[in-house]
Structures are given as C-alpha cells and as structure tokens.
Amino acid sequence: MLESLTESDVSPNPFRQFDRWWDEAVRAEIDEVNAMTLSTVSTSGRPSSRIVLLKGYDDGGFVFFTNYLSRKGREISGNPHVSLLFFWKELERQVRVDGLCTAVSEAESDSYFHSRPEGSRLGAWASPQSERIPSREVLDVNLKSLEQRFAGTAIPRPPHWGGYRVVPSSFEFWQGRPSRLHDRIVYQTNAEGEWSVARLAP
C-alpha cells in the first residue's frame, strides 16, 4: 500500500523532511540511493541533464563532485541556477531541489578527492571530460602515462576537479498515490530564510 503525504504530517523544515525520506530510502536498500539527476542551463537557455551522485548534505545544501571544465561545470559557471531530482521508484517517491550551485572549499574538495580509490583519482586526471576525443585509446594512453607519473607518490587533486554545493530555494516532495492523484508538497524560502509549505495539484 502506498504512503500518503499531508501538510500536517510533514516537517516544517524541508531538510528534516528530506532526512525522513532519505533514511527510509536507505533502509529500503534502494540501489544507488544517492543517484540524482542534475539539470543545468546554458547561457543561451538550453537545458541539459545527467546523473550525479550525492556525496553529502546538511542544512547548507547538497554536495556532489565533478570536473569543473565539463559541460555541467561550464554551464554552472555561466548560470548557477540548477535543479536536482531524486527518484526512488521502490517507494514511489521523488524529491526535487531547486537552488543555486556554488563551489565548495578547496579543503573540502581535497578531503573527498583523497578518500577516492586510486583508479578514480587517476581517472580525474586522465579524462578531459565532455571534450571530443578521437578514440578510447586517448584515455588508455593518458592513464598509463599518469600511472607512471604518480607511481609511488600521492596523487594530487587536479585543479579542474572539485565539489559543488546546491543551496536550495525550493523543495518538492512527491508521493505516488492511486489513480494518479499523487501527493505533492512544495517548500519555498523567502528573503529571511523562512520556509512556507503548500500543496500542488498532481
């Protein structure tokens, strides 16, 4: 039986409501529970979306890591307004988070980078993400060269790689219900940082 979502049941703070749903999604052992769709918009108004992995969140926002020179990095640089979407099919739930994207501190990027497996650290150097390359061989050659370059030494974080934090201005919690009469609860913040709660028609 599907759950319901009512204004009287939700937390007045969207981060606490996200805590509840996140904990339930983790307990449900959903595969890649931290996978989220990140949508960005170019300066010419063209949207693009891709899956990235949530690496942490708190009341300051939602954090992910990537190549700053990738398409998403370039679009964030030109237009920091982004949207995140979590879809937990097994619970028939979605959470959408809209907000501004800013780079995390270099210390935070360094800390996460050095926690990654060696292959992932080398991969951050080896791939000119989003750039056209003539063949797969380019990556293989780059990787082999980097393995030799960093053999026996600590692999530093590339200057073009690091984290972003999405600072929310709105949340929408979507709960599937029968007859497609789904529950949608939206939170929006004002200039004083206070959150309002409202219901949207499905």
Image (cartoon, rainbow, N blue to C red):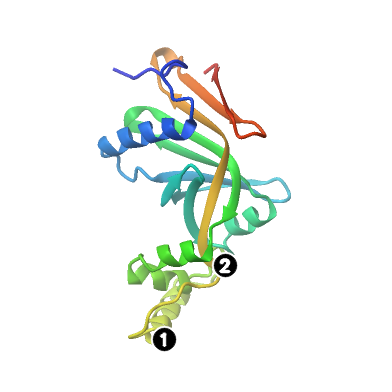
Q: Which residue is mark 1?
A: 149
Residue 11 in which image quadrant: top left
Q: Are marks 1 and 2 in contact (CB under 8 Å)?
A: no
In the picture shown, does residue 40 fall above or below 177?
Answer: below
Q: Which mark is residue 132?
A: 2
Q: Earlier in the sequence, mark 1 or mark 2?
A: 2
Residue drawn at 53 percent across, 70 percent down: 128
Residue drawn at 72 percent across, 51 percent down: 43
Residue 201 percent across, percent down from the top left: 55, 16
Alpha-carbon neighbours of circle 1 within 10 Å: few (<14), some, or many (≥20)? few
In the picture shown, does residue 85 fall above or below 129?
Answer: above
In the picture shown, does residue 190 fall above or below 105?
Answer: above
Query: Camera-side residue: 103 or 174?
Result: 103
- The amino acid beneath tag 1 is Arg
Residue 40 percent across, percent down from the top left: 60, 47
Residue drawn at 45 percent across, 71 percent down: 136
* Residue 62 in the figure: left or right of residue 101: left
Alpha-carbon neighbours of circle 2 within 10 Å: few (<14), some, or many (≥20)? few
CA gap between label 1 and label 2 equals 24 Å
* Residue 171 in the figure: left or right of residue 76: left
**What is the quadrant of the N terminus in the image?**
top left
Can residue 54 be seen at all in this image of the molecule?
Answer: no
Q: Nearer the viewer, mark 1 or mark 2?
A: 1
